Amino acid sequence: MRYFVRLCFTLALLLFTSQSSAQLNEDGVIGSYQSILSRAGYGNEELEAAGIQPKLARKQSSEDFIIDTPSQPAKLSAEPAKKYRDNETILDKGDSIVDYGGSYSSPTWGNTVLPNRVGSSPIQLSGSSPQNDFVLSTDCETGACEPFARVGNRQRNATLVGGVFGITLRRDYEDDLCYGYNLNGDTIDSTDADFQSMNGLGASLARRNECGKGWESIFWYLNDEVTASLEGTTFTHLTGLDSITHVPSGDTIEDIYNAGCCSELYRDTEILNFEFNLLRNGGEYTMRGCRAASFEFYGGFRLFSFDESIRYGSQSGDANYPFWTDYQIDANNLLTGFQLGCRNEISVTNRIRLILSGSSGGFNNFIETQQMISDDTDYVAMNYSSSENQISLLGQFDAGLSMQISRRLRAQVGYRLMGISGVSLAGDQVPYNFGHAYDLENSDVNGSLLLHGMYYGGEFCF
């Protein structure tokens, strides 16, 4: 499974890379994120060239942008001003009101830095010669004309933003359990196999349109392993292994562990997350200092997989015993369900924005566990497995900063906190006594998992 996921992720990265290279030289914008920056005065060269004068960030009004009239207008007919239709909307020549969408819903119209609309109709500004986007019709002297004619416009009513990011998370562990000790009094405990931090990669793709609606998909994956060892003549601290017989040697598993010359504890953890959310623009507001902010609601499906394996092994120098004996515990959690959340972006400076988001949801957790004792000759002395469904809750909170590098590219860094209840941890499956079959046949599903750490990466608008 992990090799298939890695292959898919590699192909996705190659796809994003090829798409980005093809788009780098095109004039465009970060469609869903440019409106606050534009109102703050960043990246408005094309608007100024077109005669549109942006003001500094403040509460939105219809006077934020003023479109200057041509310096030498063509002679117009003395008849009353005509109305014309555009996309089923009747517009008056003298009523040019410019507004724009929210931070999350604002579209990319043509190549403009900022989504401008006259009435309900989009206005495009080209990247080469903005002044030529609006010209007076040559038929205006007859009166049978539209006051303004559009030329050279390429409309886009939605933005597509892809992202690639790295993630570094730490996790909490089960209650500490001693597996073994040596003659010096040193012990090997479950938390000795501590990851410190796990590293992974992720990707995202989002689409938002002018109506303030859209969707996003998010994928990230972590996989890491760690080993702790105990040297010297070792003994097991687990209770009840004397009730499990090792038939090839005629002794018990406890006898084999107590004849060990060294012990090892190995832990492997794999985490996979996939989300598909529907987006809805929640609106804009103004913070203190006239800093603009916007928020967005989202909700959708989430799949979260948490697989953990612990292996407690002992090496024996006794010729009557196997060279290596393993007690292995596997716990697999597959959470599927729905979540709701909200995302907030606050303009700190012209280029830097504070991003806060949180989500929570209820999930069905399909749990599978297995406990097995075997040796290097593939002899299995004990094998128990179980599966069940459990209701789990998952919550996530992100706090980060984004920096606008160009009109189509921005970098992000932040902190992530995730909490999950109703999960099965491998370390919690070890029974109090191996002589009690009931403890081996039933999973412990009352554990909780806490993940926290950093994420970092970038987003690019196609």
Image: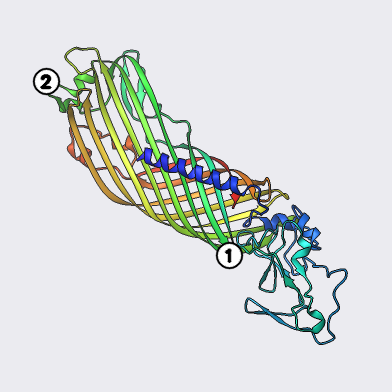
The 10 Å Cα crowd at callout 2, few under 14, some 14 to 19, many 20 or more, is few
Residue beneath disc 1: 212
Is 89 left, or right, of 395 in this rendering? right
Q: Which mark is residue 180?
A: none
Determine whether the residue tagged by mark 2 lies in a helix, strand or loop.
loop
192 relative to 315, above or below: below
- Mark 1, mark 2: which one is toward the viewer? 1
**Residue at 45% across / 37% down in the picture?**
171
Q: In percent of the image, x 21 and y 12: which residue is there? A: 318
Q: Is residue 412 above or below residue 73?
A: above
Q: Locate residue 171 relative to residue 40 in the image: left or right.
A: left
Q: Secondary structure at mark 1?
A: loop
The residue identified by callout 2 is 250
The mark total stands at 2
Q: In the image shown, does 66 or 138 lie closer to the viewer?
A: 138
Of the residues shown, which amino acid type is indicated by label 2?
A: Gly
In the image, 370: left or right of 30?
A: left
Q: Position of residue 313 (x, y in %)?
A: 29, 23
- The x, y position of residue 120, in whole percent, is 66, 73
* Residue 125, picture quadrant: bottom right
Q: Quadrant of residue 427?
A: top left
Quadrant where the image shows the N terminus? top left
Horizontal and vertical percent position of residue 372: 23, 32
Say which of 302 and 161 sits in front: 161
